[in-house]
Image (cartoon, rainbow, N blue to C red):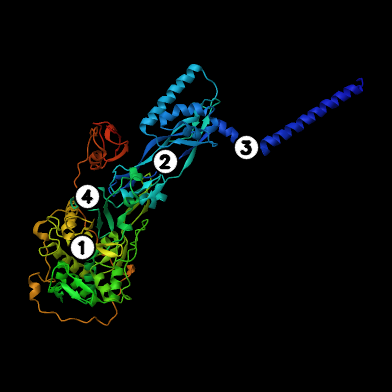
Amino acid sequence: MTPGLDKWTRLRIALVGLGLVCLGLWLVCRFFQLQIIRGSELREEANRESQKLCPVLPVRGQILDCRGNELATSTQVHSLVAHPPQIKNPTRLSRELAPILGFDVRELKEILTRAKPFVWVKRHLTPEKEEAFRAWLAEAEKAAAKQKLTGRRDIDAVYLIPEAFRYYPQLTMAGPLLGFCNLDGQGLEGIELQYDNYLYGKPKKCVKMLDARGRIVVTGEKAWDPEVIGNNVVLTLDSTLQYIAEKELNKGVAHWKAAGGLALVVRPRTGEILALAQTPTVDPNRYAQYPEEHRRIRHVTHALEPGSTFKVFIVASALDAQVVKAGDKFHCENGTWRLGAKEVIHDAHPYGTLTVQQVVQKSSNIGVAKIGNRTGPARLDQYLRAFGFGSRTGIFFPGENAGLLKNLRTTRAAIDRATLAFGQGVSVTPLQLTMALAAMGNDGVLMEPMLVKEIVSPQGGKVKEFQPRPIRRVLSPATSKLMLEIMQTVTQKGGTAETAAPPGFTAAGKTGTAQKLVGRAYSHSKFQSLFIGLTPAYKPELAVAVIIDEPKGAIYGGVVAAPIFREIAAQSLRFLGHYPQGDEQKTILAGLLPSPAAAHTLPEAKPRAPKAAAPQPVKPPTQIALTKKPEARPAIPKKPLQVMPDLSGLTIRQVLDVLHRSGLRCRFEGSGQAVSQEPAPGTAINPNTTCRVRFRSQS
């Protein structure tokens, strides 16, 4: 029989039970507070103690020319970052790091004490500063080991992370076209901006796990992570043709002490832009050092008066509308034509009667004005707009200018219609002018300008491909052929550009000399010299436009711009595999054009009144029948390298010349002269080998 418990024992048991109940209730409340009420806050604090979240910025894709040569690429650099909450003594750390990084001590301390879990201390360290920081870190580690410090150290809160740095290995080549990026790799101008959605990769974050002393033990960071690399943009631009155009343009501008110049090379059959040169230009690697005016792509943003180059489009419209023939004659008033009491048109030289062909060859203002009058304002307006004047080309580039073309149907002043015929009172962009010219070399079909060929993924798969796109038929094939024959006489004896034809080739072109507008009046001292041409004259392979701004010593397009055209065309044709064929390419006018000597013996043609019928409609794109295919071009002979050459001491451009001609791809680091390379000299290589070359300035 169990003896009964006295009342004090029962009381003690009740008190212990009550205590346990209270303890349980307290644990439940504490658990609720920590997990529910402050759960997210405490988890975040714990993560800050055990993890470091570091951004991994995207690596931009490459910009390549049509042959795979790199125009813009990304190289690896390091940036210094810090975690301010984990720094116990920012004053001492700032004092040690400031001279290494080139900071003021107070400025660096302000960065290291910001109320943020992560800060950028210095972006894109130079190799010298990176090496100095690593040396300091090594010394700090040795000092900490000697002192046998335990716990988290300040040096663990500052470290380097890899980043992609945008680099343009060709320096100033096509600089304004390529554009540039900001520190975060986002495109700001040019191709970098226009195709930023394709070039810019996907940003992500990496997680670094820390031990109790704050040292990194596990990291999710990957340098050049495939997940963050953007697509590659392949241009229609050919870096060799771009180099030729820039070289000859710079020579011409320097020779004539001009303010600047533009050159544009287009393939007429496809509308592909092969070269787009301008001077002054910019180096995208140092874009901040150039004024905004130099950074603009003036081929599409700037409109200018085309001068006498506009005459070929007036004559082509009249011929296609069949209101004139090549042999029709116009009296050019011996150089002075009065339209009214104060309205007078002059020719550079006094001419009597000229045929349509001679009007173009001699560049008569009066003759082309009379041809424009015979065509009629409504019909002429229709043709000029069909050529693309007065509207954007369709290249969809930032800041493209549409130019200015008056509505000739409502223009009442006779002087306005007359001056427009020789390129005054109308403004066009160099791209508009070149594409309109290219239409004559493409059997009369205007093509949309094509600057990007395809977009390729980092793995080599095609993301998007662009095809040549015809816009509309402007001229009949017969009229286009006839215009090429007429324009070819401009580059022959008696024309305004006798030296324009490339040696061994024929050329069909037109000169122009345009007065510049200063305020509201035409300047008598500032001019623009132009030459536009197609070569060879039959089955043209290239359409080239050259514009020189404010030349000194000469102003005429045939003297200033035509020789530059000749050199660009000659070198480009040879590079593309076209070679002179002797007398086989000489002009045979097939009876369509009278010779310059015989033109004066033809009977006077009676003026023909314009037909009452409505103008011939310009066919829409759906009515174009393009049956002619581009001819196959002979391949350029190459001798691929079998072993890796020694590149030491060479400049970036010299390395590009050696490697790209053998089909090799390369990545560059630094600038100056080559100091190391991979693969090593003498290593067996194949055309698909990727070479890495490090450069260092010797100064």
Residue at label 1? 512
Alpha-carbon span between mark 4 and mark 1: 20 Å
**Could you classify mark 4 by the number of other residues whose Cα lies within 10 Å: few (under 14), some (14-19), or many (20 or more)?**
many
- What element does badge 4 sit on? helix
Looking at the image, is mark 3 or mark 1 nearer the viewer?
1
Quadrant where the N terminus sits is top right
Alpha-carbon span between mark 3 and mark 1: 74 Å
**Mark 4 touching mark 3, by CB under 8 A?**
no
* Image quadrant assignment for residue 76: top left
- What element does badge 3 sit on? helix
Badge 1 amino acid: Gly
Residue at label 2? 226
Alpha-carbon span between mark 2 and mark 3: 34 Å
- What element does badge 1 sit on? strand
Looking at the image, is mark 2 or mark 4 nearer the viewer?
4
Badge 2 amino acid: Pro
Q: Upstream in the sequence, badge 2 or badge 1?
A: 2
Residue located 39% across and 27% down the image: 132
Residue at label 4? 250
Badge 3 amino acid: Glu
